[in-house]
Image (cartoon, rainbow, N blue to C red):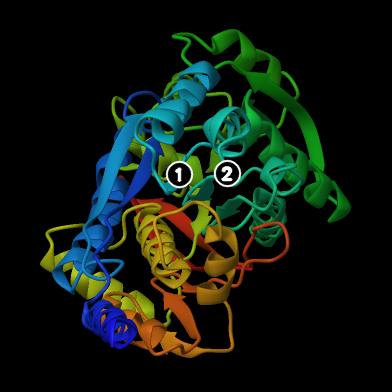
Amino acid sequence: MQALKNRLVLATAATVLLATPALAEDAKLGFLGGFTGPIESMLPAIFSAAEMAVAQVNDQGGILGGGTLSIVAADSTCSDATAAANAGDRMVNTEQVTAIVGALCSGETIAAANNAAIPGNVVMISPASTSPALTTMDDNDLVFRTVPSDAYQGQVMARLLMAHGIDEIAITYVNNDYGAGFDAALEEAFTAAGGTVAASAAHEEGRADYRAELGTLAATGAQTLVILAYGNGSGQTILRQAVEGGDFNTYVGGDGMVIQELFTGIDLSSVEGMIATRPADPEVPGAAVYAEMAQAAGQDPTANFAAQAYDATFLLALAIEKNGSASREGVTAALREVATAPGEVVGPGEWERARELIAAGMDINYEGATGSIEFDENGDIPGAFVEMTVMNGQFVEVGPAR
């Protein structure tokens, strides 16, 4: 009889345990970006887009059984590798984040990854790091990006220059992973297309005077100056001093230059028609949804790299939900699952629906604000770029840059 009673007690206890819902679990993301430094004016819009994704998760039922998703930020400065490594260390070892959105500049992403994220088994998704150096990192499949590589942007810019009848250029590039990678890709593609690179020279970020370097480039006789730098930093100074010197008649910039602050203190008539490239905002359903959400939140839906930051954040939340815990182990595999076809398509803002599909054991495929995000074996994605031009002191999108 006593044995029977014991079995009944155990059975009742088991029934209670099965009927009790799993406890909710909170999860924390880190955000790394240059809140100070040469891209600081870009940061508010990019971080706000990441925060919007987090808010949607929490407003639509939370994460991991109703837990709260939070995001904490650290300043990785863009240009200081030591600061980036320290910021990454804080995220990984002090904040104990599950995954990281960022960093933004390629050098800070590489520094934070090598010194903190990779040793800590933390997945990073950068919404803005375009250096080809990320492709070949020994990263244990932990470093991803939602923006295409400059290996491709260099090819796009080369074709764009030739299409505009520009067959000779001088290049100045910021001396870091972003600038060097972009320069190498552009030079290779431009010369292969029959163009001439009259001179190419690295410059250091943060200087007040680049006139000597500009004089050397101008001495080649090239009339087109390509500036591969940051519009909040050396890029702005170089463009202003080049205009003042009057040695070039055409200016070209990469994605880091597409920022309105670039024109501070510059004679706008001298940069009218300036050409630039930047990642495209594709005409896909997710782009329109994101634009509507951003406008409703008081954000600029066209801000550089903001949509990419939203996608990176939403993807990491989906990966954590798919993984079933806030543990770092398994996030990479879950990320690849939620980002890749086949699966039930989930778009921007559809957190509640995605959570229900995951709970039902169904595969999902996130199609984001920037389109399909099909990571290859290196964590890279295919992508598209658009041509920008300066009209009346403003960057205006011309159309696809192929």
Q: On the image, which quarter does residue 354 sit in?
A: bottom left
Residue 280 seen anywhere in this rendered image of the structure: yes
Secondary structure under the numbered disc 1 in the rendered image: loop
Q: CA distance from mark 2 to mark 1?
A: 15 Å
Q: Amino acid at mark 1?
A: Gly
Q: Which mark is residue 121?
A: 2
| Front position among marks 2 and 1 | 2
- If the image is split into quadrants, where does the N terminus sit? bottom left
- Local crowd size for mark 1, using a 10 Å CA cut-off: few (<14), some (14–19), many (≥20): many
Query: Camera-side residue: 37 or 103?
Result: 103
Tag 2: residue type? Asn
Q: Residue at x 31, y 60 (%)?
A: 302
Q: Position of residue 261 (x, y in %)?
A: 30, 35
- Residue 212: % across, % down: 61, 8
On the rendered structure, is 143 left or right of 31? right
Which residue, given by chain and number where applicable, does mark 1 sit on?
A: 102
Tag 2 near tag 1, CB within 8 Å: no
Q: Is 348 located above or below residue 88 in the figure?
A: below
